[in-house]
Image (cartoon, helix red, strand yellow):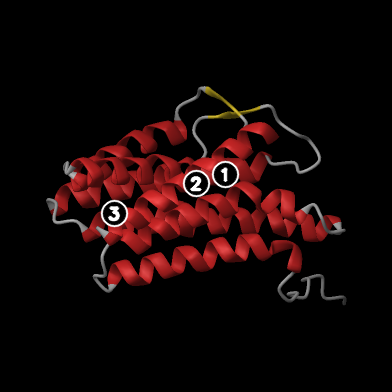
Amino acid sequence: MNDTVPVIQGFSRANLVTYLGIVSAVVGIVLCMKGEPLVVPILCLIVAGTCDMFDGSFARLFHRSDHARAIGVQLDSLADVLSFLALPIVVLAYFDLPIVAQVVVASLYALAGVTRLAFFNAYADPDTPISHYRGIPVTMAALVLSVLWLTSAVAGGPTDWLWLGGMVALTIGFVVDVKVPKPTKKSLIGFAVLAVVMLAGVIWVGLR
């Protein structure tokens, strides 16, 4: 009787950018749990978002078997769970907000996010390009939440409540059935420039 369970392979260089995003998210989570200032966790969120934008393009530079490509799709979604669901939830727990609000929002956010990723995995086909998403990709959490945090930090506003509100809006966006255009190569360049600006802004806030 043949054993049909595939052997777990080692780390693939095609997934290096995805791995970098995972490590960035883990660093942000650990530092946040240790009570360190939020500057570094926010930087980690931005880095993870940037990695997610370009990990597919990087992976396509290498020749991969169908099996390796299928693993890459799953790995990307698992990385999203850490970077754009777990990290924002840990940051939310960092704030001194009513615990009931934190638990309810974090639970709904996680449920909406993993549900969206499950549907994506069920219907994803690496060989069939798509022109738009249905609902907001979980990756957008990096952009939305970091912009809210930076804007509030610069203006001296209620960073904690804005973060909570941003997560509520994202929760709805993850599962609402609206068409969201998929970024083109030109727009990815714009997002990359925005990421650099955001990184510089967060560092500036941290050095003030």
Tell whether label 2 touches label 1 (CB within 8 Å).
yes
Q: Is residue 151 left or right of residue 177?
A: left
- Tag 2's secondary structure? helix
The amino acid beneath tag 1 is Ala
Asked whether 64 or 58 is in front, the reply is 58
Query: Which quarter of the figure has residue 41?
Result: bottom left
- Tag 3's secondary structure? helix
Density class for disc 3 (Cα within 10 Å; few <14, some 14-19, many ≥20) is few
Q: Quadrant of the C terminus?
A: bottom left
Q: Residue at x 26, y 65 (%)?
A: 37
Density class for disc 1 (Cα within 10 Å; few <14, some 14-19, many ≥20) is some
In the rendered image, residue 197, in percent from the top left (x then y), is placed at: 45, 45
Q: Quadrant of the N terminus?
A: bottom right
Q: Which residue matches tag 3?
A: 205
Q: Is residue 185 left or right of residue 49?
A: right
Q: Is residue 151 left or right of residue 16?
A: left
Q: Residue at x 34, y 33 (%)?
A: 169
- Tag 1's secondary structure? helix
Q: Which residue matches tag 2?
A: 195
Tell whether label 2 touches label 3 (CB within 8 Å).
no
In the rendered image, residue 54, in percent from the top left (x then y), is placed at: 65, 49
**Above-or-below relation of 99 to 32:** above
Q: Nearer the viewer, mark 3 or mark 2?
A: 3
User: From mark 3 to mark 1, how far is it between C-alphas?
Assistant: 20 Å
In the rendered image, residue 127, in percent from the top left (x then y), is placed at: 81, 40
Query: Which quarter of the figure has residue 39?
Result: bottom left
User: From mark 3 to mark 2, how far is it between C-alphas?
Assistant: 15 Å
The amino acid beneath tag 2 is Ala
Query: Which quarter of the figure has residue 44?
Result: bottom left
The amino acid beneath tag 3 is Val
Q: Residue at x 61, y 41 (%)?
A: 120
